Amino acid sequence: MALAAWIFAPQCAACGTPTDAPLCPTCAVSLAELGPACPRCAEPTGPRALVCARCIRAPLPLERIAAPWRFGGELASAIRRLKFTGASHVARAVAPLWAPVLAAALFEAGPGAIVVPVPLHWRRRFMRGYDHAWLLALHACAAAGIAPPVAALRRTRAAPPQSTLPAAERRANLRGAFALRRGLTLTAPVVLVDDVVTTGATLAAAARPLLAAGVPRVLGVALARSADG
Ligand SMILES: [Zn+2]
Ligand SMILES: [Zn+2]
């Protein structure tokens, strides 16, 4: 096989086996749909999708968060390969798994809505060579046939990764962590994109400067929902 054909041959996002599907049949069996979840924050709720107690007590600034899959199994391997091993092609491989959810959220957000990925701090992006949420959004937009994402936000400081902190510290860790890019005016609804959502604290922190700048509504979409980071 020619080198280019080998490099660009479609492969399983989790294990690298050649396949035309996002995940090979062996890895695909570990995919778990999120199932009934809180329509505001995507927390699983049991047999019916009801607004959870936390969202009634202290609603997130986002109108809602959607995530099609549970973070686990080989999907978790695929996301870890993307984030920590330089496997940037994983973003393209998994795009078909969640592009329809992103397209639906964009439609729900309303006319003129744009997709805005949650950005890494520039230093972390420099170390990794790319921004994984940007790549995920870019390929999912392409797969769904919608306009490419907009780099509307910047991360103002390199906060420790949320996954390393207990829930109580996540909000404080993210206070003021995002800002609108200088010189940008936004008036359209926004669909924020991140790889994994846990408590929604990161998406909430990213939504606040958008809403403060006059964005009428913010929705969130993640590829997977994690129970504990
Ligand atoms: Zn596989
Ligand atoms: Zn909720």
Image (spheres, helix red, strand yellow):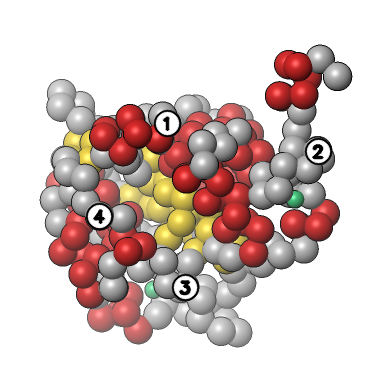
Q: Nearer the viewer, mark 3 or mark 4?
A: 4
Circle 1 packing at 10 Å, graded few (<14), some (14-19), many (20+), is some
Q: Nearer the viewer, mark 1 or mark 3?
A: 1
Q: Quadrant of residue 6?
A: top right
Residue shown at 52% from the left, 42% from the top? 85
Q: Is residue 227 visible?
A: yes
As rendered, which of 7 and 194 lies closer to the eye?
Answer: 7
Marks 1/3: CA–CA distance = 26 Å
Q: Which residue is mark 3?
A: 227
Cα–Cα gap, marks 2 and 3: 30 Å
Label 1: element kind: loop
Q: In the rendered view, would you say 219 is above or below 215?
A: below
Is 78 above or below relative to 68? above
Q: Amino acid at mark 4?
A: Pro
Report, in whole angstroms, how far the alpha carbon at label 4 lies from the one at label 2: 36 Å
Q: Is residue 138 left or right of residue 126?
A: right
Q: Position of residue 82 (x, y in %)?
A: 53, 43
